Amino acid sequence: MTFRDRLLLSIVQKGHLCVGLDSRYDRIPNASSSIVDTVFSFNAQIVDATHDLAAAYKMNLSFYAGFGLEGLEALRKTSAYIKENYPDIPLLADGKRSEMGESVRMVKQELFDWLLFDCVMVTPWFGFDTARDYLDDPRHGVCVYVHDSNPSAVEFQDLELRDGRKVYEVVAERVANAWNSNGNVWVEGGATYPEQLRRIREIVGDEMPMLVAGIGPQGGTVASLRGLFGTDGNRLLVNSSRGIIFAGLGNNDYISEARKAAVKIRESIFSVK
Amino acid sequence: MTFRDRLLLSIVQKGHLCVGLDSRYDRIPNASSSIVDTVFSFNAQIVDATHDLAAAYKMNLSFYAGFGLEGLEALRKTSAYIKENYPDIPLLADGKRSEMGESVRMVKQELFDWLLFDCVMVTPWFGFDTARDYLDDPRHGVCVYVHDSNPSAVEFQDLELRDGRKVYEVVAERVANAWNSNGNVWVEGGATYPEQLRRIREIVGDEMPMLVAGIGPQGGTVASLRGLFGTDGNRLLVNSSRGIIFAGLGNNDYISEARKAAVKIRESIFSVK
């Protein structure tokens, strides 16, 4: 089964929520001195409590690699746990590892073979070479950061070109029309820039899956999702990380608080569909 | 001592060569079944054979992370070995880890605290937010990929803007005039695009250190380095990876072949100064 088919099926079955497991060890309640145990056990509980609500999980790799070998071991155990217990849920590697040629083969070994991810996320800065070597294997996806949610995302992404287009519009156009020859390339945009999100959907068309980040703590709202759902209303995935996994910080029952937050965000996404 | 001062002193003392330790386990001669031992021992020999020629070492992280925990342990041991035996030589983390805010703190823990690097390399795609959180600590550097050496680097980097400039020129201008408020930000360019290299040097001025990649197997020549050396002729660092460390593949004495290649490339750089 291709990555794209798995992702779309998962969205049809679960809805549009992607839960970001940015499980920073030193923020986890009741942490023990073992990083592996603390992070893995927290993640396993979060996953058990949200697996019926989450169409995908996304991990920002830095929150694991920041704690060295133990952090990465906790990440690997988390991926293995999800693969074993909820094998249909795609795992997205948010790591900005934008390599080319020989080093792409290395990134595949790192992210797909070792850490069990289904999709890599790359910046488009180096052009098509960054995506090319993923196209021969449609079981894995490539998600391109077309327009991010952070304040300075506009610094280069929104520069205006001679023909009147913005840089991110050209990226969206190239990804949709030149890069996606095997159906496994898709795009990311930031909820803090609703106008750009709409333009990305317009440019890539209604078929391509789209990931939106930046809802919640980063300032994006679900209102920005209107009109983005694509063909059959199932081409949109919306990530929330801290807003879910750390929703219950300071609360004894932080796992059920996380589930409550996931339910709420998932429903609020449906409300604008 | 700041990163910038260390780097410039190292260039004055050693010349312009940066040796790229892209030491892929499955290409190393006489490999044992232990990834840690094979990669670390190869690196230690290469470093011992080139430390008097190398102004810096650069590691592409994917060549280590591609071999999982053992690959990363070999990387950490290599960094520790260099820090212990040749503490003046700066270590550059070629990993494209372009994060923002909280996740930058994590990247610092990963690259500076755990893996002992002195400088992170980031894509400019997300704008100033990617560099901002490194500015408070000038003991560490941030090198920005302004124009890379790969064929598709031009796809977005060379798009022409309304005012006639190219995207990469705006990046160079912003890095030099807005991002580098604490002296620890510098720029990278690719030797396969000599015209763009000259423009980058023109825009950032003669003071800023500049890293050039893509000499050798990637098709760049030392002729492209003319005019890039900057103030006092010591603001240029030129990376070579495979062309040095694997120069002696198939040869019994591959370590002295690597040294010979380093000597040759180092001298060829001086020849265009």
Image: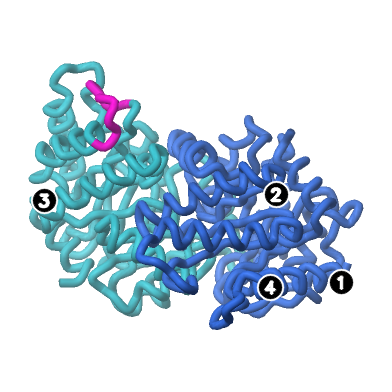
Chain colours: A cyan, B blue
Mark 2 surroundings within 10 Å by alpha-carbon count, few (fewer than 14), some (14 through 19), many (20 or more):
many
Numbered disc 2: secondary structure: strand
Question: Residue B134's image quarter?
Answer: top right
Q: Find numbered disc 4 in the image and state the secondary structure of the residue it sits on.
A: loop
Q: Are marks 3 and 4 on the same chain?
A: no
| Residue of label 3 | A14
In primary-sequence order, the first of circles 1 and 4 is 4
Gap between marks 3 and 4 measured at Cα: 50 Å
User: Vertical placement of A165 versus A78: above or below?
Assistant: below
Residue at 82% from the left image edge and 63% from the top image edge: B228
Q: Chain of mark 2?
A: B
CB within 8 Å, label 1 to label 4? no
Q: Which numbered disc covers residue B272? A: 1
Mark 2 and mark 4: span between their CA atoms?
Answer: 19 Å
Q: Earlier in the sequence, mark 2 or mark 4?
A: 2
Q: Is residue A266 visible?
A: yes
Q: Are marks 2 and 3 on the same chain?
A: no
Farthest residue to the bottom: give it: B250
> How crowded is the residue under tag 1: few (<14 C-alpha within 10 Å), some, or many (20+)?
some
Q: Are marks 1 and 3 in contact (CB under 8 Å)?
A: no
> For mark 4, what is the residue?
B215
Q: Main secondary structure of the magenta part?
A: loop
Q: Could you say which is closer to the camera, residue B27 or residue A147?
A: B27
- The residue under label 3 is which amino acid type? Lys
